[in-house]
Image: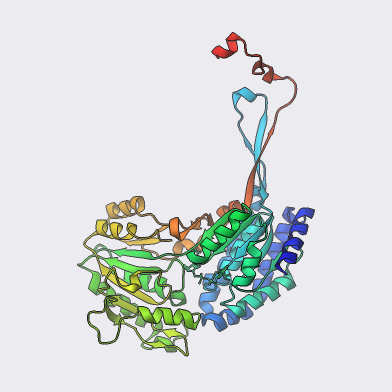
Amino acid sequence: MTHEVFNRLRDAYTTGVTKPLAWRRGQLNALCRMITENKQAIIDAVAADLGKPASETLLMEIDLVLSEANFVRRRMRWWSARHPKPMHWLLQPAVGWTINEPKGVVLIISPWNYPVLLSLEPMVDAIAAGNAVCLKPSELSPHISHLTAELIERYMDTSAIAVVEGGPEETTDLLAEPFDHIFYTGGGRVGRIVMKAASENLTPVTLELGGKSPCFVDGTVPLAATARRIAWGKFTNAGQTCVAPDYVLATPDVAQVLAERIALAVTEFYGEDPQASHSFARIINERHFDRLSRLLPQEGDADDPAGQIVCGGQTDRVDRYIAPTVLFGTSPDAPVMGEEIFGPILPVIVVQDAREAIEFINARSRPLAAYVFSRNPKTRGVFERDVNAGAIGYSLPLGHLISSRLPFGGTGESGMGAYHGKEGFRVFSHKKTVISKPLFPDTLQFIYPPFNDLRQKL
Ligand code: NAD
């Protein structure tokens, strides 16, 4: 089945149907119409999979896809145009230019945590660049996966845009096809599988992976406002956000108070009982629920390396609910400081100063983002210069995800390549060089052999 889909897309691409700007514009318009006419159905499907609050789906998924589509739609003519380049004197008279041609038939493999955004935003960029697109949504969010397949079938040009649903088996079949680009968002384990498979066909890849994104807080910032920012970034989508703050490193003068302020912000946002709040999401499935539950400190164990619970800690497996949890005094060797947490658990760790925080961060895998809460320009500067991360956010977690003007991507274990806006258009394009020199006058006669003494001197 996957082979037939690939062949259909390849045939469509070969006919050139996806290349005209009119087709690209038409498909982007259709995609926007598809989203706006089915907002409620999309919200319901995401809620069925993740218990995600409607406002979160609207603000962090639907609106972001629509604004990306508007952004690239207005600029893709310019990005697709010829860009002339000055020529070397040796070639004069001559002209050269570049054009961005579509890569061809591209595969987008998306995860379950932002199932609308992370499927449709790369699709917007791929269509704007003139590609035929195959989307493989995550099987772990089946409601939105089915709905996306059904809507794309209804609204879009299915000769050149397809959705293949399924899990590892279908993905493995797809990865065997000679796509012209693979854009994968998800964990590093599967990222490695994708890259290995892509190498068989020499297919270029973009890997949007995860990692433990740290926050650093020192005594120069107002703690209540800082705590609210961190709590929002962490507990949105119940912590299942690739750029969510994973843990906090705080200086001794503020660490304990900060942890308590974050707990206060949790109550402000989700009330005394977050399980009853309409603003707090659920864990995607039992496997992740069990994984996260094991990271929590054991009740009554004062020496648990996970630290002490400042707030939260409650779990309900039937409801796939884990309370927004703040831990204090977590040991760097605790299991919760091993892998990316990807859930609503936030350890707060004491460090002496910014230098120690940077050493702590750089001793681990490169994170997708690092967030700095400090008014000290020197501290900010050192973080910007010395921390290896996909992005730096001052006083703002998650924010860079929201702009079409800022490239979004990781480094090292957190991924390779970036997208959003122009960067997304680039990812799905090949910059083709074109050069032209008239045959007459033939100035190349000055460099043709045989080489006489004069030319050798030159
Ligand atoms: P996931 O389980 O939904 O997997 C992602 C995709 O890989 C799915 O389409 C799935 O079908 C496919 N897949 C799973 N097993 C496979 C296999 N054996 N062979 C081939 N394909 C397979 O998503 P996930 O990995 O649980 O996502 C969570 C991770 O993604 C986190 O680490 C998170 O930080 C990261 N993430 C990164 C970004 C980003 O933009 N950088 C965004 C969201 C999530």
Q: Quadrant of residue 419?
A: bottom right
Q: Quadrant of the N terminus?
A: bottom right
- Can the viewer see residue 324 in this picture? no
Residue 242, above or below 275: above
- Can the viewer see residue 150 in this picture? yes
Q: Quadrant of the C terminus?
A: top right
Q: At 65% across and 66% down in the image, what residue appears?
A: 173
Q: Is residue 225 left or right of residue 446?
A: left
Residue 162, above or below 389: below
Position in image of residue 67 (x %, y %): 58, 64
Q: At 33% across and 60% down in the image, what residue appears?
A: 361
Position in image of residue 84 (x %, y %): 64, 37
Q: Is residue 423 left or right of residue 287?
A: right
Closer to the camera in the image, 158 or 67: 158
Q: At 23% across and 69% down in the image, what residue appears?
A: 254
Q: Quadrant of residue 270?
A: bottom left
Q: Is residue 59 left or right of residue 386?
A: right
How many marks can you see? Answer: 0
Closer to the camera in the image, 41 or 145: 145
Q: Is residue 271 left or right of residue 329?
A: right
Position in image of residue 287 (x %, y %): 47, 80
Closer to the camera in the image, 212 or 439: 212
Residue 304, above or below 415: below
Q: At 40% across and 57% down in the image, what residue appears?
A: 389
Q: What kind of colouring is applied to the model shown? A: rainbow
List the single residue furthest toward the top. Answer: 453
Position in image of residue 71 (x %, y %): 60, 58
Q: Quadrant of residue 66?
A: bottom right
